[in-house]
Image: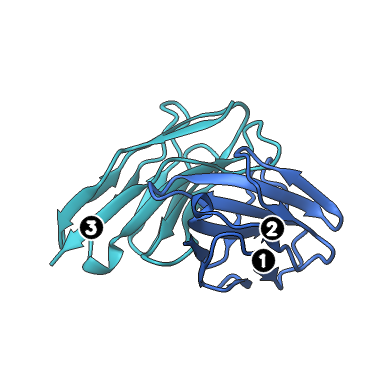
Amino acid sequence: EADIYQTPRYLVIGTGKKITLECSQTMGHDKMYWYQQDPGMELHLIHYSYGVNSTEKGDLSSESTVSRIRTEHFPLTLESARPSHTSQYLCASSEWGLGRSNTEAFFGQGTRLTVV
Amino acid sequence: GNSVTQMEGPVTLSEEAFLTINCTYTATGYPSLFWYVQYPGEGLQLLLKATKADDKGSNKGFEATYRKETTSFHLEKGSVQVSDSAVYFCALSGGGSNYKLTFGKGTLLTVNP
């Protein structure tokens, strides 16, 4: 079983609040990712990191920001939540970069965010 | 660039029916191919994978064979159960991508008793 954890599992919050979604992994993986899953189930990469102090934006533009100060920790922050941020957010990690074949990603259980 | 096309859902089957979910891909080089499953309210779990042509991945009664000649990785199960109800994603890594898994759009499977 993968050792990657996301908290909280569910979050309902008011517009304008600052929120941080936590993601931690105990596998020692350098590569970590955040995906946003829309109601139609499609997955969009919004951030990734190849190691400490490395962060990059993914394919889908997002108002969220991320940081990577420790290998095991990759939190996502929204400075001012809006209803359009309502979504499921999935964190993942991999031992190698996903551009390399035979590399699989391990996913957390997700955070379902609702902004009212 | 890379892309994955999988069968549109939703798919509804009766228990013990045969399941096929089609998946085809476009990629350069030699990608690895995956099926991930997402149960209601959960994250994604790796179901099976194949890393080279003609490899067969299998797990929990599910199988998929990496067919390079048809660029396909169809998911099959001989007899589905109610507990198989979930969303299934076909995905690839490598194949020229630097940093991400390329996912299909997902197929929702519902199995009725």
Specify the color scheme.
Answer: by chain
**Residue B20's image quarter?**
top left
Q: Which chain is blue?
A: A
The letter of the cyan chain is B
Residue located 38% across and 64% down the image: B39
Q: Nearer the viewer, mark 2 or mark 3?
A: 2
| Residue B79 visible in the displayed image | no
- Camera-side mark, 1 or 2: 2
Please identify the quadrant where the N terminus of chain A is shown.
bottom right
Q: Which residue is mark 2?
A: A79
Q: Are marks 1 and 3 on the same chain?
A: no
Cα separation, mark 2 vs mark 3, equals: 38 Å
Decide: is A13 above or below B12: below
Mark 1 Cα within 10 Å, few/some/many (few <14, many 20+)? Answer: some
Q: Who's the residue at 68% across and 56% down the image?
A: A94
Say what amino acid the circle numbered 2 marks.
Glu
Q: Is residue B18 left or right of residue B41?
A: left
Q: Nearer the viewer, residue A101 or A55?
A: A55
Residue for point 75% across, 67% down: A73
The amino acid at mark 1 is Thr
Q: Position of residue B5 (x, y in %)?
A: 41, 33
Left or right of A82 on screen, residue B57: left
Question: Are tags 2 and 3 found on a single chain?
Answer: no
Is the Cβ of the residue at disc 1 closer than 8 Å to that at disc 3?
no
Res A77 quadrant in image? bottom right
Lower sequence index among marks 1 and 2: 1
Q: Cβ–Cβ below 8 Å for labels 1 and 2?
A: no
